[in-house]
Image: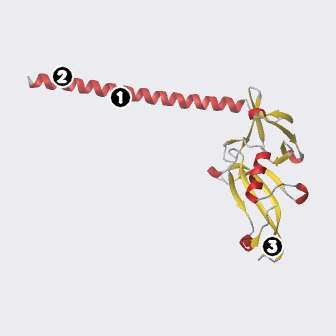
Amino acid sequence: MYKKIFSIFAFLLIGFMGFALAAQVDGQGNGSEVQASDAVNQQTQEQNRIQVQDGTHVGEGGQMFNVQTQANNRIKLEVGGVSAECGCEMKQEKVENETKLYVELSNGQNAEIKVMPNVASEKALEKLKLKVCSEEEGCQIELKEVGSGEEAQLAYELKTQRQSRVFGLFRAQMQVQVQVDAENGEVIKTNKPWWAFLASEPAE
């Protein structure tokens, strides 16, 4: 009697373990298939990307932007009168009626330019408490790679001179810069001279 019960129990246990193992293998197989599919889709997308073309393009949400090749193969990206130059290899990809822009970073990753120069400039000026970025006053916006290795990312860097007063008495020009992430629009870093804490910066 005991042998019969033990045999049934052993049979059920082996059957259950076999079923569990089969389900696990099947789950791993599906995961591998999904990863392979994602890799193929990414490779197909990259193959569809070509060197960015000069002219006016339609971006996400119907926003118009202009691309012009400058001297030394620099690319000028302009939206709404605000422009930024990039000394990079920029590519474009057509997705239905929209054009997406990409820049390959030194770590091999492709960064998509989701934030346009006008939005990045607005974010940077807000951080610096400035109203305008004027080239006549030395304000410049550049699209560039910042960071290194796995930390590398594509960002707009706005540089300008600010009038300040050291100890509230002496006038001094302060070189300031702000970096804004080109993919999500977040402010990455703000740089000011070491003596900035001694100076007051009037709001403009």
Residue that protrudes farthest toward the front in the picture: 203
The residue type indicated by label 2 comes to: Ile
Mark 1, secondary structure of its residue:
helix
Q: How much space separates mark 3 and mark 2, taking CA atoms?
A: 90 Å
Which of pointers 1 and 3 indicates the residue nearer the eye? Answer: 3
Residue situated in front as seen by the camera: 18 or 181 = 181
Which residue does the numbered mark 1 point to in the structure image? Answer: 21
Query: Is 170 on the left-hand or right-hand side of 9?
Result: right
**Lower position in the chain sequence, tag 3 or tag 2:** 2
The residue type indicated by label 1 comes to: Leu
Image quadrant in which the C terminus is located: bottom right
Which residue does the numbered mark 3 point to in the structure image? Answer: 165
Query: Is 120 on the left-hand or right-hand side of 78?
Result: left
- List x then y, in percent, for residue 200: 76, 70
Residue situated in front as seen by the camera: 62 or 1 = 62
Which residue does the numbered mark 2 point to in the structure image? Answer: 8
**Callout 1 crowding tier (Cα within 10 Å): few <14, some 14–19, many ≥20:** few
Tell me if label 2 and label 1 are in contact, CB under 8 Å: no
- List x then y, in percent, for residue 124: 75, 54
Instruction: Identify which residue is drawn at 59% across, 31% down.
Output: 38
**Lower position in the chain sequence, tag 2 or tag 1:** 2
Mark 3, secondary structure of its residue:
strand
Image quadrant in which the N terminus is located: top left
Q: How much space separates mark 1 and mark 3, taking CA atoms?
A: 73 Å
Mark 2, secondary structure of its residue:
helix
Residue that protrudes farthest toward the left in the picture: 1
Query: Is 183 on the left-hand or right-hand side of 118?
Result: left
